[in-house]
Image (tube, helix red, strand yellow):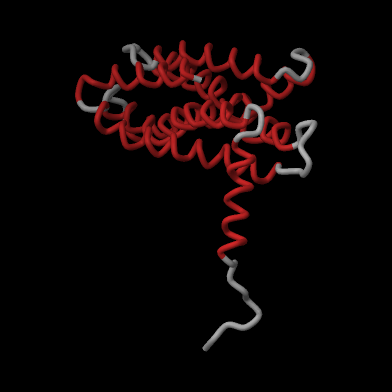
Amino acid sequence: MPVTGVSLPTLEALLRGLGEIWHAFWLPFVARYSLVYACTKGVNYAMFFWLPFYLSEVCELDPGLADGLSVFYDIGQCLGGVIAGSIVDKMAKGKKSIVITSFLLLAVIPILALSLKHSSVVPITVIIFIAGLLVGGPANLISAAVCADLGSQTGIDSNVTASVSGLVDGVASIGAAITQLTIPLLATGSSWAWLFVAFTGGMNAT
């Protein structure tokens, strides 16, 4: 039965939409923050999905305990966004790039520390929490506040906040997908150390 009242977009409308997306991508700082978020989201998703497996298989923790410890990464992420936003508003005077860069550089420390052997779950828990805080802070800032700023810059005729947000998140999703594809190639046997080196490389690349 044919559907009435629904019209498909014309080729002209599709081309116009692609043109607007292309224009939005080349707005000041949009491409740069898209690549930054691609690296950050790649590391973030890798930690989120692979951390329980790493803790159980490599650190030889009970799978239930490994899942429980992984929750502290999520808790750190939530607090990281709040802390990073508060620093931007109250201390950094709106200079988000300084806060993002500082968090990502500091995130290298706990990520590398995860590759070391630890005698108890206490240091592992602390490291996981700090990693979530330092990675989640920049990720939340870029996906929310930064995208809003990029889409409403002075000199832009129309508000393209939605287009910019979609672009930044879309490019970041591609980066996250590529990261997920490369993890099985690195995370085999004793090669887990190379995986954490790659993570820190992603942090430094941002």
User: Residue 196: horizontal and vertical position, in percent?
Assistant: 35, 19
On the image, the x and y values in percent for residue 200 come to: 42, 16
For this view, does 151 lie left or right of residue 115? right
Residue drawn at x 68%, y 26% as measured from the top left = 82
Q: Is residue 199 above or below residue 146?
A: above
Q: Residue furthest left?
A: 189
Residue farthest to the bottom? 1
Q: Is residue 203 above or below residue 27?
A: above
* Side (left or right) of 198 relative to 9: left
Residue 113, picture quadrant:
top left
Observer-nearest of 179 and 35: 35
- Pick the residue in front: 190 or 12: 12
- Point out residue 146 in the picture as x, y percentages from the top left corner: 68, 30
Q: Position of residue 143 (x, y in %)?
A: 62, 35
- 90 to the left or right of 118: right
Query: Residue at the location (47% across, 15% down)?
Result: 204
